[in-house]
Image (cartoon, rainbow, N blue to C red):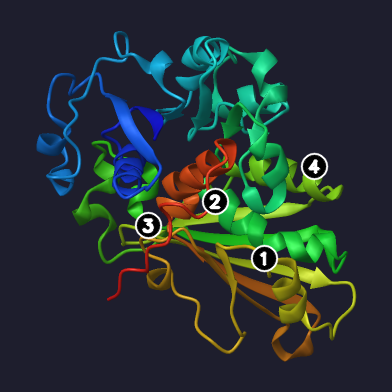
Amino acid sequence: MTSIGIVGGTGYTGSELLRLLAGHPQAQVRVITSRADAGQRVADVLPMLRGRCELAFEDPAQAPLGDCDLVFFATPNGTAMEQAPALLDSGVRVVDLAADFRIKDLAVWERWYGMRHAAPALVEEAVYGLPELNREAIRGARLVANPGCYPTAITLGLLPLLEADLIEPSRIIADGKSGVSGAGRKASTGLLMAEVGESFKAYSVAGHRHEPEIQETLRLGTGQALGLTFVPHLVPMVRGIEATIYATLKRPGVDLTSVFAQRYESEPYVDVMPAALPVETRSVRGTNLCRLTVMEPQDKGVAVVQSVIDNLVKGAAGQAVQNMNLMLGLPETAGLDGVALAP
């Protein structure tokens, strides 16, 4: 049985990791840390794990993380870059669910995240953990940067079009909508039910830190620089991301669904749907799936992609487990084959 550690177990992504790993057939959580809840039983803090986890939270300063085969960092930005180097030196593999190693251009990263990078030598080594783009590199990695939630939905929606050179890369619009859990588990007036309920708003319109991540990932993956306009929105639901992407076609009239179906035919967690079917966040809730449709409405020369994921699963913890499986030579789908929660 593979031994797993989790740094930061009480946030939404940390608790989602625990939920997924509780049913994993070949991996077991041995160490889980929390500064605020050190000494408390996991099942007392997270009651959904009663009967499934007998561990207590440990202080990260004393936790035996070096005894694990792999450690997840489900922590705020800036934590993994401080602590991961020592774990890597001791032979432990690391998956960082925050943004510390996602962007190769350090100047860009430091501008968007507002801090100096503590481990610049590891940035180049880190593999961007989108299996549909970097599967073989992930298999051999000791450090994986788990992608952001918006970047996962948008990158998967654009990859087939860019790889087939079907769209103008300089004219792309991505309209993203996220549930409130995407902001993390924290006390904030703007995230209160009375503030977000029965409302809908755009935010970070002038610039969102996921935009440079999307642009760099697709540039490195396809060789094409993007002119991307990305606007995120907050919707009054707990889980889910929907991204509607608009791009000008170079060659109108192409069977776009076939292009997507061929690109993702061997991918276990990308479902290309017929364009006539609705794409809904509830169809992926609790799963590691990305569901997509693509069409050219009214033959007007614009490709419209709809992409939905659960921001806490394929957008965070589920993708992290998928990466763990690849890194440790386990079946890629192990622990990730749940059916969506509906209604």
Alpha carbon separation for disc pair 1 and 4: 22 Å
Label 4 vs 2, first from the N-terminus: 4
Viewer-proximal residue, 94 or 205? Answer: 94
Classify 240 as above or below 166.
Answer: above
Residue type at tag 4: Leu
Q: Please tell me the numbered disc located at residue 332.
A: 2
- Tell me: 162 left or right of 30: right
Q: Which residue is mark 1?
A: 266
Q: Which residue is mark 3?
A: 179
In contact (CB < 8 Å): disc 3 and disc 1: no
Image position, residue 7 (x, y; %): 36, 25
Alpha carbon separation for disc pair 2 and 1: 12 Å
> Helix, strand or loop at disc 4?
helix
Q: Which residue is mark 4?
A: 220
Instruction: Give the number of the mark in front: 3 or 4.
Output: 4
In contact (CB < 8 Å): disc 2 and disc 1: no
